[in-house]
Amino acid sequence: MIIKKRGLLEPLTIFLRRRFSLHLVKSDEIEVVSSILNNSVFVRDKLWILIFAIIIASIGLNVNSTAVVIGAMLISPLMGPIMGIGLGIGTNDFELVKKGGRNLLVATIIGIATSTLYFYITPLHDAQSELLARTTPSIWDVFIAFAGGLAGIIAVTSREKGNVIPGVAIATALMPPLCTAGYGIAMGNWYFFLGAIYLYFINSLFICISTYLIVRFLNFNKKRFADRNTEKRVSKYILILVLITIIPSIYLAYGIVEKSIFENNAQKFVKENFAFQNTQVINKNFKYSSELKEIDLLLIGVELTDSTIKRIEKKLKNYKLLGTKLKIRQGLNAKQEIDFSQIKASIMEDVFKRDTVKIDSLKPNKLQRVLPDVSSELNILFPLINTFSLNNVIVNRLDSTKKDTITLFTAEVQKKMLSKEKVRLEKWIKVRVKNESVRVILQSK
């Protein structure tokens, strides 16, 4: 029986080894190390390439051009020193670790300085969606950086290089967060700076870790020392460095995972428990921290009774939201601090749309248009806005049969917005919805 079992497993083992074994396609170790070493140094040509790549990426973020940002990432040489650090850790080469770290620090400082200078002198200072996307890292950024780093080091250590490295440079996206950090400094927005640097740190760290894992898996030769005590000391330093780097990242990654899970559960909870015929959720805000977990909802329509709210609160545990505070603001109850202006803004919108045709009834190929979700961007760019709605409508002219297609933006603001700020809001909405026909209605307290 044992012989038969081995006979059945052996062909399968051979098949899997031929398909998946990295050792069979491993390139010459000296060649791999030499290649990573050359790409780790930032002098002369690589330094100028980095500077120009930073400028291109900054322009792409500034004008909200995804294609330009991708182009900058393709020519970026930032992955070199990060892989150098991972290789040094994996081979006990403390000098290579220091060299890679020093070059990465130089590249980072130059990158931030270049982007800061650009954003300081550019006449376009508004944060577009491409830039805002680099200020709030999520768990997906961790997975992308780790998987991208694995793909990158496998390509470097393989005899058949292929065209993987450009794709890895795009996927891991080291350049955009570095430019966003420069934007944060130039605009004096430390929230942007810290969020972008955090994303840059995550990408760099997990590319380094993935490089280390593949180097160890492929059994690269470790550096030996004449003095055994020196070797132990260097190994200890490298281990301490790895732990100092990894432990905070695990904590940060854990926080990102917890927040993502909380927000997903909260979204599901609201969707499944607040689907009432005469009551609608017009604004929702999820707050997550070690001290507070809160779901803040603003409702209009028929007020929910206390018994209904308590019944819904009891369902929080079914969505793994035990300990979460459910804050519901509805009606005109002053104790719940509902803004009467929000109700007035909704009425104004209804009045304006009274003589319009719903966009759903129009021809899909011409007039139906999917509008982007701009809530997170509005929250950062225009903090005075409390609630808003964004819709495509058709306006019927009473003096003719002509119909105009416009995008209607209505919002309730904390206080009256300055004229220039309203103009900036209108211009920004036109860019985001890609429609010049925009009407803005603001209602202040």
Image (cartoon, rainbow, N blue to C red):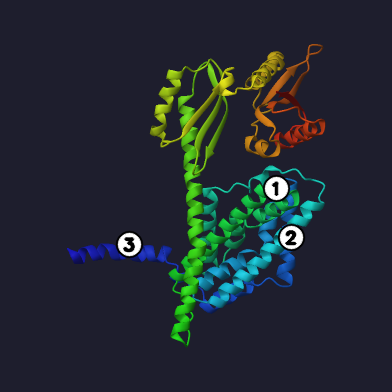
Reading the image, the residue beneath label 2 is 113
Residue at point 64%, 31% (across, down): 370
Q: Which residue is mark 3?
A: 12
User: Which tag, 1 or 3, sits closer to the chain's start?
Assistant: 3
Q: Is residue 197 left or right of residue 439?
A: left
For label 2, the SS is helix
The residue lying furthest to the top in this view is 398
Q: Amino acid at mark 2?
A: Ala
- Observer-nearest of 192 and 165: 192
- On the image, the x and y values in percent for residue 88 come to 53, 73
For label 2, count other residues whose C-alpha is less than 10 Å away and answer few (under 14), some (14-19) or many (20+). many
Q: Is residue 116 above or below residue 97?
A: above
Residue hosting label 1 = 189
Residue in the picture at 65% in, 47% down: 191
Q: Closer to us: mark 2 or mark 3?
A: 2
- Residue 300 placed where, x, y %? 57, 19
C-alpha distance separating marks 1 and 3: 57 Å
Quadrant for the N terminus in the image = bottom left
Mark 2 touches mark 3? (CB < 8 Å): no
Image location of residue 187, percent across then percent down = 74, 48
How far from the left and from the top, in percent, is residue 345? Answer: 68, 20
Q: Can residue 222 be seen here?
A: no
Q: Which mark is residue 242?
A: none
Give the residue at x 49% y 42%: 291
